[in-house]
Amino acid sequence: MVVVDLNDQSFFYDVMSLTGEFLPGEKIKEKPLTFEENSKDTLISVILSGNEAVVSSKGLVEKENIEGFERREVKSGVKRAVYRILSKQTGRNLPWGTLSGIRPIKLISSYLEEGLSPETIENKLYREYYISEEKAKKGLEIACLEKELLESADLSRGYSLYIGIPFCPSVCLYCSFSSYPVKRYQNVTGSFVEALKKEIAATAELLKGHPLDTVYIGGGTPTALSEYELSDIFDALSNDFTLSGVKELTVEAGRPDSITKEKLSVLKKYGVSRISINPQTMNDETLKRIGRAHTADSVREAFELSRETGFTNINCDIIAGLPGEGEIEYQNTAKEVRKLSPESLTVHCLARKRASRLTEEWDEYKDSAFKVTESALSVFYDLSKELLMRPYYLYRQKNIAGNLENTGYSKEGASCLYNVLIMEEKQPIIALGAGGVSKLLTGKKPMRLSNPKDPLLYIEGTEDIIRKKKEGLVRTGWL
């Protein structure tokens, strides 16, 4: 256990987050009044006194000058001192340095907005945040591309729509999303669609006069619904919203075992411009292990069917760090995905989520999961280059394998604008359906409005969800 002693408790979360990056799996808590100095627990002391931040642990002491610093700069100074001590104790350097948040590109983007040169930005990332040279260059490349992509969106008056469909063919080992086995909920899906149509109609009425830039339908697996239910949802969308100006309409057809010719025809009919077919791995043994009720052959068949239906922008998700996988398995997945030739590729590093079965059964998997290194991950970076893709968005997660990141790569013209908008928080994201989280801009941190994850609670609470959405839009000045 790691015990943190601070004389300014407002920095506890920052110190805890950074400590967790160095010591994943360790329990971290504030120093109790009864703490014994000879305890086996590691004590990290952080004292802000006058013009200095002094951090000490196990006989090591690091100091940072904070004279005249604003609070944000003080926090950065504290984290630098904590970083240096933990780096000495563990013998490790973190690829993303002191940045423990999920949106490192947002910081780099803010420097671009200030007019700083690329060279100045890279130097700040090395010097102030201890970010590795490789990550700094990658982050800057992505931030520059994101800036170009955002120019196509109406950031002053526009918004994006997220629709959460909470059903899947089966629930994967690592999943913590709103996901319920569709076979067990067959008697609920019709009522869910009716409740969603009600929320669609009410939201469209609220947002009249604001241009809709992107629509993203995720979950869950939207294509776990029948073609008739999908058609019903799209009918409501196209009748209630003005979709003619939408720049991008994405549907997560993530599970190949949920894809049929009839469902793909519905998506094509209603103008879906981008779909995801997500193998996660092309190794059948791993697919069984993680609870995916399909094979690598199913992925190939779903791709072929999607191409025949006319889809020319398909994304593939891959996860590094799945139980039992290493570089040999990555090489096989890369070889098979290369044959599929998707337009975009999203490479995730496995993250251990509190609500997932992976966490519940961690003792069974801890020795065979999470083994991700930069060199192993380079297999997928090389794949992206062979497919003529560039990285266009990036985010990190708590408890992410290898302390690395998730990266989206795409061919020219195939980037997902919605992914950039939700990461950069430059435009309101209005979420409908189960498990969706609306983000309403306030000038500071976005106001978050969460819809219930459970489809039954969503169905029962639709009127209340609509009311809260209206109140939030009024408070943020949109109505």
Image: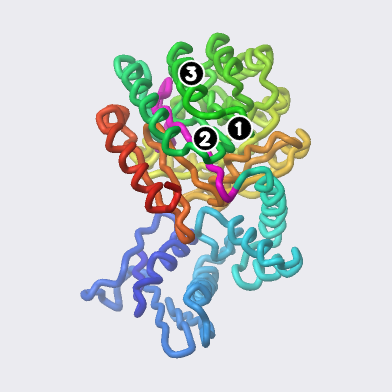
Residue 134 rendering spot, x and y as whole percentages? 70, 57
Quarter-wise, where is residue 381 in the image?
top right
- Residue 64 rendering spot, x and y as whole percentages: 53, 82
Q: Is residue 288 at all visible to an observer of this figure?
A: no
Residues at marks 3 and 2, CA–CA distance in whole angstroms = 44 Å
In the displayed structure, would residue 371 be above or below residue 36? Answer: above
Vertical order, 423 against 170 (above or below): below
The residue range painted magenta reads 155-176
Along the viewing direction, whichever of 47 and 289 lies nearer the viewer? 47
Gap between marks 3 and 1 measured at Cα: 16 Å
Of callouts 1 and 2, the N-terminal one: 1
The residue lying at 52 percent from left, 87 percent from top is: 67
Magenta stretch: includes residue 149? no
- Residue located farthest toward the left when viewing the structure as drawn: 34
Q: x, y percentage for residue 277? A: 58, 25
Q: Nearer the viewer, residue 247 or 377?
A: 247
Side of 413 relative to 32 (left or right): right
Please name the amino acid that badge 3 sits on: Asp
Residue at the disc numbered 2: 324
Q: Is residue 153 left or right of residue 3?
A: right
Residue carrying label 1: 246
**Residue at which label 3 appears:** 235
Secondary-structure class at tag 2: loop
